Amino acid sequence: MGECGLSAERVSAMFGKRTVVRDVSLAFQPRQLHAVVGPPQSGKSTFLRTLNRMHELTVGAWMTGQVRLDGREVYAPDVDPAALRRRVGMVLPQASVLPGLDVRGNVAAALPHGLDRARQAQEVERALVRAGVWEEVKDRLAADPRRLGEGLRQRLCLARALAAGPDVLLLDEPTAAIDPGSGFKFEEALYALRNELCLVLVTHDPRQAARIADTTTFLWLGAVVESAPSRQFFTRPVEARTEAWLTGRSA
Amino acid sequence: MSRPVDRIGPALLGAALLAGLLPGVLALWGISTRGLSAFGAVDWGALAPAILGTALLTLGACLFAVPLGVAAGLYLAEYPHTRLARISRFVGDVLGGTPSIVIGVFVWGWLVTATGRFSGWSGSVALALVLLPLVMRVTEAGVLAVPVSLREAPLVLGWPRWRATLSVTLRAGLPGLSIALLIAVARVAGQAAPLLFTALGNPYLSADLREPMAALPLTVFADGSAPGAAAQDRAWAAALLLVLIAALLGIAARAVARREEARDG
Amino acid sequence: MPGPGRNASQEANTLQRTDSGDRWYRLVLTIAVTTVPALLLVLVWQLWRDAGPAIERSGFGFILGTGWDPVQDEYGAAELLAGTVLTAGIATGLAAPLAIAGAFWHEMFAPSALRRPLAALVDLLAAVPGVVYGLWGVVVMVPWCRAVLFPALQAHIGWFPGLDGIVYGPSLLAASLLLAVMMFPFILVTARQILRALPATQAAAALALGATRWEVARYVLFPAARRALGGAALLGAGRAVGEAIAIAMVVGASHGPIESLLAPGYTLASVLPHEFAEATSAVQVAALSYATLILLVVAVTTNAVARLLVGRSIGDAGARR
């Protein structure tokens, strides 16, 4: 594991007749954090959702192109989308609490069947540690997650996504709806996870990408404008449009 | 800076509301007073067959309509773009707009003539046909009302669709769904038309669904037009019972809705 | 390292289809949803079969034929149809304007302390079963009509067509009035849902620009909702067409040409509770089934047109959120 990469080749995504993602080709190397940035409505989230086959669940949505996980085409007819999503996990923009389950249960819900209780507790703790929340919730494992703050809930969702043991983790604007303090703790956890996973982070905040991403891709109106290692992206962008966006001169 | 029309206009609207409400309120008042005095005077033993009958018939209707309707509603929510979904949704609307007397005549021709007898079962089937489109619509709406992020959360973990919908979406939507279902059931319990030619009515206390069965709405209809104080008492008592059921469920619905609102903030 | 529960050999196959649960799930749901159109087909087919003898005898002429004679076994549905149209029309004409006006008041002008209780009251009125309204109608309303209202109408607007003749009490007009009472809460609830489903942006912008609430209601909301509100009225009419029990109790149960609104009569729906159980001949039963079929068509068409006007923005008024 850990050596798994994700690649997109000429991916376009449509809703009915509307094309939202145009001809995007990107390679996401393992053990790195890749950021995809851009203004709102630039197709970032839609693109992300083609990577774990969530895009097709929307009525009228379809895509063209190829997505490969570790070389294997994920849209092949013999691939089970649910199995794919166990290997390519996702954190959604809104934290969600699975009903009827406490903190421990919410994280354990991601574990595969057939684990005994001891192993379950072990994996739950491991996931919470990797998400950087163990210290804060270890005494509250039986609490109702709805009573936790929004920031803590989202970090719990990160733990839940990790508990499934994915090789790749997709994050769709994970810190957009939470307080900055929790956002920073979330980023810390992501930064540490770079050693274990391939991470693809969609964010509208370029500074977040500058803080933690190894590579940054700029998406504008559904197409890739520029993709480069972050240091180069932020200090010496090649494209004029990239620079305009970074300096705030365009929408 | 209000001109005369800004005050007259709303006043007229309010007056229209009052005019429309007045007869209904008078009706409620008349039903309550006559019903309450009937509660004191009526022979509850004579009303027992109808009370038991309504309970059994409604239960039977739920047995048929709820599993079927929930499953159909789930289909509409899960696969909305298929031709089957579009057709069924439209047909559901048509069935929902079918007068309940038509359903009674249909079940009579279908089951009663075929089996040669009036029975509680055919009455239940008739009520179930009235209930089915309601359950279907309420289930579909209930599933769609669950926020997208919650519906997707189990999916991005790699859960199969059936587990995601049943364990998470349905579970999350259960409070609202249960209440809406109860309200639909209460509405069906008050229906007389589907039972006229199916369950027929029965003066004796009976729990045998293979025989004709009494029901509160049938009592209201039959005894309401019958002469004599005893019959009138039964009719008004049955009527008030039906109104109380509807009122109590309405209150429960509001209480649950308020609690959900408070919790989601 | 691999995730929990996975070893190296499973790695290679982890993308393969494993769970057949989803296929069963879809199968069960598909069977369930297919029963709905199936049931409707059976319903129409059964009614058609039951009406067979009458259709053979009279064909489409049944719809236009007058007279309903069980003795001679001669049946025509024209008077029933006229009764249905008249009662539903009068009821909707009375109830819809009041209900729509009331909905506007409730949404735009009601003081906040009144809104919830008012909604609860209207919901309760809408939830009262038809048979209970019928009981109140026959015991309370009709005697009052015969003693007070109808004579007053005759005295003051007796020139109005249809208001002449003997005042019986149970009559087409009584049925129309009772229907109006029943339809009012239903149309009001539907109209409120329509108003609430309107996008709030236009109204908000108008208010911000200094328009009064009345101006917003009259010039912004009403034009936008007009079509859907017409649909709401039509939905009420559709319900009125199908109401059998309550009407049967107050309409006077009398066949024959409609000479006066104050005289007893019949509608398509209300003839069934009275005659179906006691039908003497097979031809009569067939004729009643034929009438049922016509009732189905009228009710379904009215509702279909109504739904087109209303659009799919709101759900069923009875199955609230």
Image (cartoon, coloured by chain):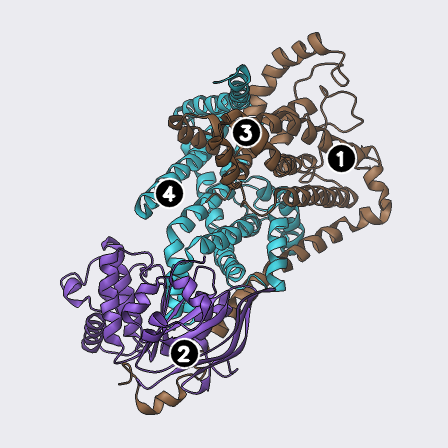
Q: 10 Å neighbourhood of mark 1: few (<14), some, or many (≥20)? A: many
Residue at numbered disc 2: A83
Residue drawn where x is 66% and y is 49% of the image: B106
Q: What whole-number distance in Å separates the C-alpha atoms at marks 3 and 1?
A: 38 Å
Mark 3: secondary structure: helix
Q: Where is residue C84? Give x, y as percent.
A: 71, 33
Mark 1: secondary structure: helix
Residue A250 seen in the figure: yes
The image quadrant that residue C183 belongs to is top right
Q: Where is residue C34? Give x, y as percent.
A: 60, 63
Which of labels 1 and 4 is toward the front? Answer: 4
Of residues A6 and B168, the one drawn nearer to the viewer in this rendering: A6
Q: Amino acid at mark 4?
A: Ala
Q: 10 Å neighbourhood of mark 4: few (<14), some, or many (≥20)? A: some
Answer with left or right where residue C227 lies relative to residue C85: left
Mark 4 on the same chain as mark 3: no
Figure chain in brown: C
Is residue A3 shown above or below B247? below
Figure chain in cyan: B
Q: What chain letter is assigned to the residue under label 1?
A: C
